[in-house]
Image (cartoon, helix red, strand yellow):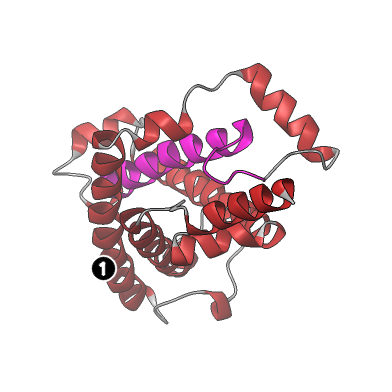
Amino acid sequence: MSSIAATDTTISTQQTKVIQPAWVRVMHWINAVAMILMIMSGWQIYNASPLFDFRFDRSITLGGWLGGALLWHFAAMWLLMLNGLAYLVTGLATGRFRRKLLPISPASVFADIKAALTFKLSHGDLTVYNAVQKLLYLGIILVGIFVVLTGLSMWKPVQLHWLVTLFGDYPAARYVHFVCMALICAFLVIHILLALLVPKSLRAMIIGR
């Protein structure tokens, strides 16, 4: 009986424990909306002057035409920049990034990838990120910084010529921007897939527990 009671107490504690604080949940969903708006409007902008021999179907673009897409893209850009900056500052100030994303090592990443491929990767404690999650989240933060910097260099190439120079030139900045967009799309696919495979992680990002 004592073991059953202890188990019930553990389950009850896990259910009431705050896994994702309110500020993380709010900023997460704002970022999600901003990213989707920027990706869809960005695809419409890309269609006006494609880098490669393909265009995105109009059904998955936003804005209707170049001018409309640019309006959506700039609006979402400010939302993503301000919210992303607030997320970075808060994450660093509260020590959340240090606690959740560090330490990380190649050995731990390979070990967790192997465990994931053999369906042995544990998801019992959502308060602790495994090495693969740490790598993905650190990577997407870095990609987010690059996508903003390349976006700014493309938006104001004359005023921010020094920023354009960091990427080589304007065409190079466009290619880097496109690659960052593709990486963000890949992250979103993996992120959503993992959320579906571990539904309690999605619940935690909605209600916090």
Percent x, y for residue 89?
A: 24, 40
- Looking at the rendered structure, the secondary structure element under dot 1 is helix
Q: Nearer the viewer, residue 12 or 120?
A: 12
Q: Residues within 10 Å of mark 1 (few under 14, many from 20)?
A: some
| In this picture, residue 92 sits left or right of residue 200 | left
As displayed, is residue 46 above or below residue 66?
A: above
Magenta highlight range: 124-153
Up-down relation of residue 17 to residue 49 (above or below): above
Identified at 20% across, 37% down, the residue is: 161
* Image position, residue 189 (x, y; %): 63, 57
Q: Is residue 115 above or below residue 201?
A: above
What residue type is disc 1 on? Ala
Which residue is at 41% across, 69% downward? 37
- At 31% across and 75% down in the image, what residue appears? 67
Q: Which residue is mark 1?
A: 75
Q: Is residue 147 magenta?
A: yes
